[in-house]
Amino acid sequence: MSDHFIRTRSHMGWIEVIVGCMFSGKTEELIKQVRRARIAKQHTLTFKPRIDSRYSVREVASHDQSRLPSIPIEDASEIQTLCEKGTSVVAIDEGQFFGENLPAVATHLATSGRRVIVAGLDTDWRGRPFGPMPHLMAIAEIVRKQHAICRVCGGPASRTQRLVMGEENILVGSTEAYEARCREHFDPELSLRPLTGKAHHLSLSNP
């Protein structure tokens, strides 16, 4: 988002969405935006789903270990209750793990004059739209699409490849369970069958 947008629309709220596959720097970008807001002396609050405790229980943490204090919650409805008077920026990480009420909560916060930043996966391990993120992208003023590096060919990656066996839609993990892939090398059926020699060969993180 340009500084011009911030200056001209600072009197009203809006929604920003940061999306992409795993390892594309979504959380890192969210942390960056919150830190910039703090430099501008804006009151910020950051939330994360309680289910995501990979690196920290009470911090938002990127894969490169950038960290930001946050409030773990079970449901998006808690954000409105916990949002303090005077808060001008509300940041929400791993938005895909929240329910379908997240867009309504984000809309309420933006209508009340707050800047709302939501980071999350736009597609799941099968390449399907993930949770409330598509709805948020549709109603947001700003959408940032992040890309990672494909672990097979080194090209731009937009898909999250699951490497471990399982059919559950939500499996919290990091490099031991996922890697970034481009469209060509993404295999949504990989985790549904025993890993073959070919699958191992394609995955640079699992030689």
Image (cartoon, rainbow, N blue to C red):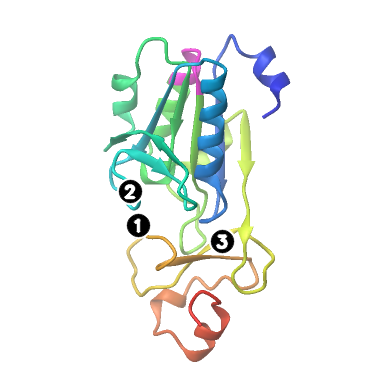
207 sits to left or right of 102: right
Q: Which amino acid does label 3 sit on?
A: Arg
* Residue 66 magenta: no
Disc 2, SS: loop
Decide which of 124, 29 is in the foreground and name it. Answer: 29
Give amino acid for label 1: Val
Q: Write the start and end of the magenta stretch as one range.
A: 109-115
Rendered location of residue 107, percent (x, y): 47, 24
Picture residue at 65% right of the left edge, 71% below the top? 184
Q: Judge whether residue 129 can be spotted in this image.
A: yes
Distance, label 1 to label 2, CA atoms, is 7 Å
Q: Which residue is drawn at 56% across and 48% down?
A: 25
Q: Is residue 136 visible?
A: no
Residue holding disc 2: 52
Kindly report the distance in space between the C-alpha atoms of the residues bearing marks 3 and 2: 20 Å
Of mark 3 and mark 2, the one earlier in the sequence is: 2
Residue type highlighted by circle 2: Asp
The reply to whether dot 1 and dot 2 touch (C-beta < 8 Å) is yes
On whether residue 110 falls in the magenta region, the answer is yes
Mark 1 vs 3, N-terminal side? 3
Residue pictured at 57% horizontal, 12% vertical: 12
* Residue behind mark 3: 159
Q: Is mark 3 on a helix, strand or loop?
A: strand
Give the CA distance from mark 1 to mark 3. 16 Å
Q: Nearer the viewer, residue 89 or 9?
A: 89
Q: Along the line of sight, which residue is nearer the eye, 37 or 124?
A: 37
Mark number displayed over residue 19: none
Mark number, residue 172? 1
Quadrant where the N terminus sits is: top right
Q: Which of marks 3 and 2 is in front?
A: 2
Category of crowding for the residue at label 2, using alpha-carbon neighbours closer than 10 angstroms: few (below 14), some (14–19), many (at least 20): many
Up-down relation of residue 54 to residue 160 (above or below):
above
